[in-house]
Image (cartoon, helix red, strand yellow):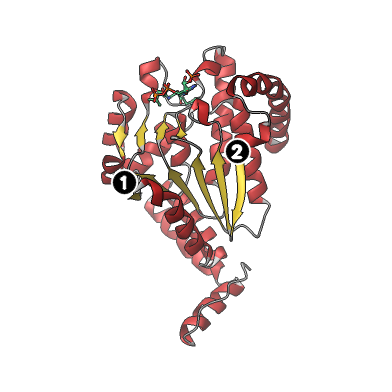
């Protein structure tokens, strides 16, 4: 039922968005809606690139829908074992598209927030590990998008922030919940109530960011890390990710029980035999993902 409703809403939004996007593309000198999120295979990793650089990759509905469809395609592709998400140009994403949001009624604003939530939750819920390679501004919805990835790698030039209060708004794509879980209440309040941007070094100090790189080294570092992740046992990585997520939102005893059950379940995979045999016979494992 839920997925039927979702796809219906998505179809309606797609139709409406195709019209809106034609105008936006003309303004921004682009011609193809599917160009809004570029999708490229690099080994076992899928590289997704937000591609609206003239608007600093601001997330309008068309871009969110393009991202949603790219994420859904990854979920269905067993050959993809890791994902890297980055932005074209000098931004990762400078937030939700303010020009588009300015026209929204309260109900349309809620639907826009829901579209972002559904898209980011689909990304967060992927079985494969995901890395945000934050090359520049990650503000508002852009910061929230990075937060939906498992790891955040950042360029020294990256800037993070939840500046919504400066616009008279609040975060609407998970900033109050995912940011809080990642950095704790003190820094979540600093960023969400204060609305000031922080640099990459500060973001790393508060554990919003995992690692910081020179700008030219960022993407290669993220892709190399993704390939290393892709070489691990896919069933184990997926289960570990699931237990971390579900365990975070429950009490510690239930989290311990989740872990025990998942530990038992991973023994149903072929990969666990391969991984341990490889160790015991001093060779590299060849995981099948089964
Ligand atoms: C629409 C945007 C945009 C945005 C930048 N642009 N951010 N358009 N929505 N969020 C556009 C600018 O209008 C401009 O277009 C072009 O990108 C380049 O931006 P400049 O401002 O000229 O660049 P610069 O001076 O370098 O400043 C960069 C910046 C600034 C600091 C990132 O653009 C900025 O503050 N952007 C807004 C950041 C923000 O408030 N994000 C949160 C949005 S609310 P033109 O056509 O003039 O060249 C949000 C809510 C999420 O994310 C939840 C929703 C439910």
Whether the residue under disc 2 has CB within 8 Å of ligand 1: no
Of the four image quadrants, the one with ligand 1 is: top left
**Residue ID at (61%, 74%):** 270
Mark 1 neighbour density, 10 Å: few (under 14) some (14–19) many (20 or more): some
Disc 1 designates what residue? Answer: 207
Q: Secondary structure at mark 1?
A: loop
Q: In the rendered image of this protein, does residue 34 appear above or below residue 284?
A: above
Foreground disc of the pair 2, 1? 2
Q: In the rendered image of this protein, does residue 170 appear above or below residue 32?
A: above
Question: Does residue 190 appear anywhere in the picture?
Answer: yes
Residue 15, position as x, y percentages in the image: 73, 24
Tell me if 217 is positioned left or right of 173 in this view.
Answer: left
The one of 273 and 44 positioned closer to us in this rendering: 44
**Residue ID at (69%, 30%):** 10
Q: Secondary structure at mark 2?
A: strand
**Residue ID at (69%, 38%):** 3
Tell me if 283 is positioned left or right of 22 in this view.
Answer: left
Question: Does residue 58 appear anywhere in the picture?
Answer: no
Disc 2 designates what residue? Answer: 37
Mark pair 2, 1: CA separation: 27 Å
**Residue ID at (38%, 53%):** 252
Q: In the rendered image of this protein, does residue 223 appear above or below residue 186?
A: below
Residue 44, position as x, y percentages in the image: 59, 60
């Amino acid at each position: 039922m839920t997925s039927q409703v979702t796809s219906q809403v998505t179809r309606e939004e797609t139709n409406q968005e195709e019209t809106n996007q034609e105008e936006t593309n003309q303004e921004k000198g682009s011609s193809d809606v599917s160009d809004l999120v570029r999708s490229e295979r690099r080994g076992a990793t899928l590289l997704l690139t937000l591609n609206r650089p003239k608007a600093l990759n601001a997330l309008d509905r068309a871009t969110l829908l393009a991202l949603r469809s790219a994420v859904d395609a990854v979920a269905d592709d067993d050959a993809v074992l890791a994902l890297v998400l980055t932005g074209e140009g000098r931004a990762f994403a400078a937030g939700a598209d303010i020009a588009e949001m300015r026209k929204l009624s309260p109900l349309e604003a809620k639907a826009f927030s829901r579209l972002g939530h559904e898209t980011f939750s689909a990304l967060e819920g992927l079985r494969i590990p995901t890395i945000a390679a934050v090359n520049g501004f990650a503000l508002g919805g852009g910061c929230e998008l990075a937060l939906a990835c498992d790891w955040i790698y950042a360029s020294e030039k990256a800037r993070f922030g939840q500046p919504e209060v400066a616009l008279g708004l609040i975060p609407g794509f998970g900033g109050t919940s995912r940011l809080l879980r990642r950095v704790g209440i003190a820094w979540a309040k600093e960023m969400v109530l204060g609305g000031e941007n922080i640099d990459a070094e500060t973001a790393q100090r508060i554990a919003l960011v995992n690692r910081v790189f020179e700008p030219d080294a960022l993407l290669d570092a993220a892709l190399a890390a993704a390939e290393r992740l892709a070489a691990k046992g896919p069933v184990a990585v997926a289960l570990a990710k699931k237990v971390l997520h579900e365990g975070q939102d429950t009490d510690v005893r239930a989290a311990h029980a989740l872990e025990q059950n998942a530990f038992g379940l991973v023994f149903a995979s072929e990969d666990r035999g391969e991984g341990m045999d490889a160790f015991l016979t001093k060779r590299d494992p060849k995981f099948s993902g089964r």
